[in-house]
Amino acid sequence: MLNKILPMALLAVLLTGCNATFTNLTPKQQVRNAEGLYPVEVSMNTRQGTLRWDSIQPKIMIGTNAYPMRSTLLMSNRWEGLVPVAPGTNIVYYKYRLDFLYNDFGGPKPDSRLSEQYRLLILDE
């Protein structure tokens, strides 16, 4: 019986070790501003020990458009960026995408993680 359970348990541990958890730190609504740029911020936590944190290239995805993000000061797992919103648009749907390298046999390999979709409501006041 143990011979049947042990391989399944090991497989479950291996598959869950690569999960990334995104936390959207952006308010769900913001007041419209003259620039049409709205700040967003995300943090990511993972148990993937092979991830090379210095290689992460974060982006904000709106449809097929990608907007760069930068590291938040003094934090290794937080990034911030600006989302452009056209005048007259009240809702924007966006995702976060993190491209990175991880250590593997034979050298670093590329990978990426995509967050769930978030909604930003722009209020006219």
Image: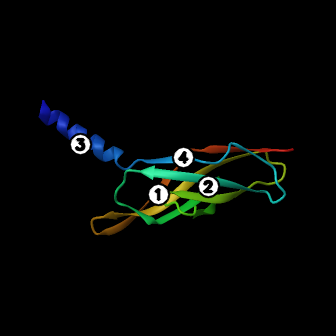
Mark 1 neighbour class, 10 Å CA radius: few under 14, some 14 to 19, many 20 or more: few
Place residue 72 in its image quadrant. Answer: bottom right
What's the residue type where badge 4 is placed?
Thr
Quarter the N terminus occupies: top left
Place residue 65 in its image quadrant. Answer: bottom right
Quarter the C terminus occupies: top right
Instruction: Say which element carries label 4.
Output: strand
- In space, the residues marked 1 and 3 are separated at their CA atoms by 24 Å
The residue at the point 49 percent across, 61 percent down is 76
- In space, the residues marked 2 and 4 are separated at their CA atoms by 16 Å
Number of numbered markers: 4
- The residue nearer to you, when weighing 107 against 54, is 54
What's the residue type where badge 2 is placed?
Met
Mark positioned earlier in the residue sequence (3 or 4): 3
Query: Mark 3 against mark 2, which lies toward the viewer?
Result: 3
Place residue 29 in its image quadrant. Answer: top right
Looking at the image, residue 26 lies above or below residue 34? above
Residue marked by disc 2: 61
Q: Which mark is residue 10?
A: 3
Residue marked by disc 4: 23
Residue marked by disc 1: 112
Mark 3 neighbour class, 10 Å CA radius: few under 14, some 14 to 19, many 20 or more: few
